[in-house]
Amino acid sequence: MTEFSSLSVDLMERILCLLPIPTLIRASTVCKLWYSIISSSTFSSSSSSLHPWFFLYGLHNTSSKNHQSFAFDPISDLWFRLPSNTSFSNNNTTSAAGFLFTTAPTFSFSPVLSRHISTTSPLHYSRFNPLLGVFYSSHNHNHNRPSFIVVGGVRFIGNLVDMEDRLTVEMYNPDLDSWDICPPLPSDFPTGISSSSLSSALFKGRFYVFGINSSFVSSFDLVSQAWSNVQTLRPPGVSFSFLISCKDRLVLAGICNSQAGSSFNLWRIDEKTMEFSEFAIMPQDLLYSLFDSDEDDKFACLKCVGLGDLIYVFNEDYHKRYPACVCEITTTTTQQSGGGKCKWRRVPQLPSPVNKFHQVISFCSTVSLHSILRGRGGDAGAEAHV
């Protein structure tokens, strides 16, 4: 039989890219050739790092010692306990597209699994709990430097918040380190809007804002800097839902009530017409495994995040230590006009011990293996924990 060392580099890459990130980190220590392959940026873009991880940051109001951070790798089907980052350990922490943010009193951001923190020039309005989007503009001289869009939130002045102030949209220009003022969210959305009542999705050059309970939706064109007309996006029977940007589609995910009972459904959204078509329903036994009570309002603690081909649904209540499940969407040529084929499965329990949190921050992010090994997006502490 041909020895592995006799294979071409291209074939080695194709074999190694099937491994989960924790295994790849160990494999990178085998020899210089393997390290060179695994740590390259081209390998990272085609390896298991494309399968987004699920991150859960638990915050405790009275004791920072009780903060905990976890990351779930869907390839190895394992949770990892992360070292705490005190700079992102308060209730003004939010996340988007692989970054952690604080927006008040200063605007700071850090890549996931990194201790490197960057601070921009201050926002025109210091905000609490806004919606955030990350994009890379072709107008920037350095296309690798991220631009940001900040929508809503409540005004933060000292230790007080102003719920009545309708904040304008701000967009960050990394070339000038400046924030541009843009039109505010349409008045159909109430004042004091924040990420607790809204979900957002950045898709094909537009930043969508969606009311989790109101079902109002509007999108902001990142080029023309104008909002679309407000529409209502509510399939029959939906009580609340989340708008998610997946790899090739907009997805609405939420609880639907019918005569047969409650279910968690997925709808594909046509971004041109905003029409919806159902393509998946979570198995009912999986849905009810996320709860340990029969209370009528038990579904209110469900949250949903997604990226790429994965959608994570979890219970942010402590009773079952924040149980979660994941849906993997696959699309074939014959399914491209529909939603695709879905595979649901339960996510393993968080590693013990798990504290009781006052606030849970959850998000999906790809993890750059290249950054972890090269030391630019990760650090020795994060790598050791993996």
Image: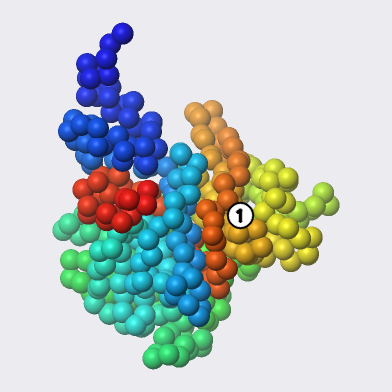
Residue that label 1 marks: 323
Q: Position of residue 312 (x, y in %)?
A: 54, 51
Callout 1, which amino acid?
A: Pro
Q: Which residue occupies 27% across, 24% down?
A: 12
- Viewer-side residue, 276 vs 310: 310
Q: Position of residue 323 (x, y in %)?
A: 61, 54
Is 32 above or below relative to 258? Answer: above
Is 73 above or below relative to 143? Answer: above
Q: Is residue 342 visible?
A: yes
Give the total of numbered labels: 1
Q: Residues within 10 Å of mark 1 (few under 14, many from 20)?
A: many
Q: Position of residue 20 (x, y in %)?
A: 40, 37
Q: Which residue occupies 28% across, 11% down?
A: 2
Residue furthest right in the image: 259
- Viewer-side residue, 125 vs 327: 327
Q: Position of residue 94 (x, y in %)?
A: 42, 68
Quadrant of residue 9 within the rendered picture: top left
Q: Which residue occupies 64% across, 42% down?
A: 280
- Viewer-side residue, 135 vs 46: 46
